[in-house]
Image: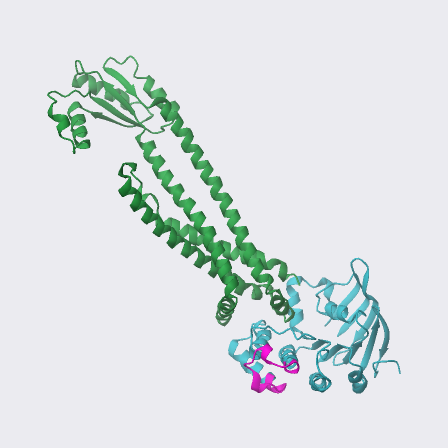
Chain colours: A green, B cyan
Amino acid sequence: MGKISFFLKEAFGSLLRNYFMTIAALVTVFLSILVLGAVLVFVFMTDAALKDVEQKVQVAVYLKTDPDPSAEEVAALQAKIATWPEIKTCTFVDKETGLQRMKEEFADRPELFESITRNPLPGMFEITLNDPSPAVVEEVASRFEGEPIVDEVRYGEKYVEKLFALTDQARNVMLIFIALLGVVAVLLIANTIRLSIFARRREVEIMKLVGATNWFIRWPFVIEGVTVGFLGALLATVVIILVNNYLLGRVSTALPFLRVPVDAVPYTIVTGVLIGVGVFIGALGSAIGLRRFLKV
Amino acid sequence: MIKFEDVTKIYPPSTVGLERVTLEIEKGEFVFLVGPSGSGKSTFIRLLLREIQPDRGRVIVGGKDLATLRSWKVPYLRRNIGCVFQDFKLLPNKTALENVMYALLVTGSANSASKKRAIEILNLVGLGHKVDSYPHELSGGEQQRVSIARAFVNHPPLLVADEPTGNLDPETSLGIMQLLYRINKTGTTVIMATHDREMVDRMRRRVIALEAGRVVRDQKRGGYGED
C-alpha cells in the first residue's frame, strides 16, 4: 500500500514537473487517438450504411396482372418458394397493400392518386435471402423462368455485383488503414515517451546505483504513461462524440434523403476501444522507452 | 570481503581499464585507491558495482563471484554497497530527506520508518536543519554529506567513494574525510579513490596505487607517493 502511494506520488510529481513533456506526449496521444477514432466512427457508419443496402437487396417477383392470378395459384407458388433453402423470408404483397404503401410513401402529394380509378399495381413476392451474394441472387431469380403466373423478376442484376465488390473492398481498406494507424500511434507515442525518459536518464542511472530494482524504477514511468494515454484518449473521445453529433445533426437536416444512420456508432464501444488503446499504448510506450536505460 | 583475481578489463577497441589485477581487501579496512586519471580507479569501482564485467579474471564481493550473479540480483548487491561520487549523484527533484529516503524505500522499507531513519542519519552528518532543501539549494560540501548519508543509511558492509572530495575545498574535504573515517569505525569497509595527496598522507591507511591499469604499489600504512 505504501509502495503504491509512493509510486503514484512519484508519477504525478514528475508529470507536473516535466509539464512540457507531459503536454507533448498528451498532444501526441490525443492526435493519434483522434485520427484512430475518426476512422473507427467512419467504419461504423459505412458499415451500417452498407448493411442497410444489403438488407434491401432482395428479389422482387412481380406477378401477371391481366388477369390477376387466383389466390390458389399464389399460395401454391409461395409454398414452393418456401421450400428453397436459400430463402430467408418470402412475403406476398397483394395489390391493395402495394397501393396502400405507395400512398403512404407519397403522403404529401395526395393529388397523384385522385385520378386513379382502378389499382394498376401487380401483386408481388418480396424475397430476402440468407446469403445475398450475387451468385445466389441470380440462381434464385432464374428459377422463376417459366412460372406461368410470374411476369417479371427484378433483383438489380449488375448493380448487386458491383455493390458487393465495393463493400468488400471498403471493409478491407478500412481494416488495413486502422492497423497502420495503430502502429503509427504506438511508434509516435513510444518515441515521445522515450524522449521524455532520455531527459531523465541520469535519474534512472542514480536509482539503479542506489539499488532500485527495474520494476521499482519502472512503475512510476508506467503510471505516467497510462495517465497520459488515458487523458489523451479521453479528450479525443469527447471531441469525436461532440463533433460527430454536431455533424450528424447538420447533415440530417440539410440532406434528409441521405438517411444518415444516426445510431450507427455505438458510443460505449468506441469510448471503450479508444480509451483502452490509449492506456495500452501509454503503458507500452513507457515500457519500450525505458528499456534501453535500465541496462546499467 | 573483496577479492580481485587476475582481473583484466579492456574497453574496446584497446584501452586498458585494468590489467591483471590481483588483490584482497579485508572486512573493516580503509583503503585509498590512488593514481593519475585513466589509471583504472573508476574501472575498479565500476567492476565492484557490476556496472561492467571483467574480460578476464574474477571479481568476488562478499563471497559471491559477480560474473555468476544473475542480473536481477544486481540491485540487491548494490544495496550492500554504499556509493559516493565526485558529482554527488543526487536526484535533483527530491529534497535532501527524500534523497536519503529513496535508498531505504527501494529496499521495501516502510515510509514512516524510512523517514525516521533518514532524519537520524542527516542529523548525524550535520544536516538536520536542511532536510527539506533541494540539492541546488545546498553547497557542494552539503550535497556530498547528503550523498554520504544516502550511502550509509542502510548500514552497508561496504562503502565505495569515487573522488568524493574532488569538487570540494580543503576544509570541506576534511569534514567529508572525518565522516568517512567515522563510518569506517562502525565496521564498514571503505574504499576511496582519490587524487587528494594531502588527505592520503595525513590518514596513513592502506594505499593501492594504480598506473595504466596495473597495481604498482600496495602499502599497509602508505602515503600518496613513494616513501
- Give the left or right position of residue A171, taking residue B16 as reference: left
Where does the image place residue A175, in percent across and percent down from the top left? 46, 40
Quarter occupied by residue A231: bottom left
- Residue at image location 30% in from the left, 14% down from the top: A145
**Is residue B64 visible to us here?**
no
Above or below for A47 versus B182: above
Above or below for B178 versus A82: below
Quadrant (top left, top right, bottom left, bottom right) of the C terminus of chain B: bottom right
Residues A78 and B135: in front is B135
Where does the image place residue A240, in percent across and percent down from the top left? 38, 50
Quarter occupied by residue B191: bottom right
The boundaries of the magenta stretch are: B122-142
- Give the left or right position of residue A119, taking residue B224 as reference: left
Where does the image place residue A39, in percent across and percent down from the top left? 43, 44
- Residue at image location 52% in from the left, 51% down from the top: A186
Residues A85 and A50: in front is A50
Q: Residue A94: within the magenta?
A: no
**Is residue B192 visible to us here?**
yes
Tally of numbered tags: 0
- Give the left or right position of residue A170, taking residue A123 as reference: right
Where does the image place residue B136, in percent across and percent down from the top left? 59, 77
Quadrant (top left, top right, bottom left, bottom right) of the N terminus of chain B: bottom right
Q: Residue B141: within the magenta?
A: yes
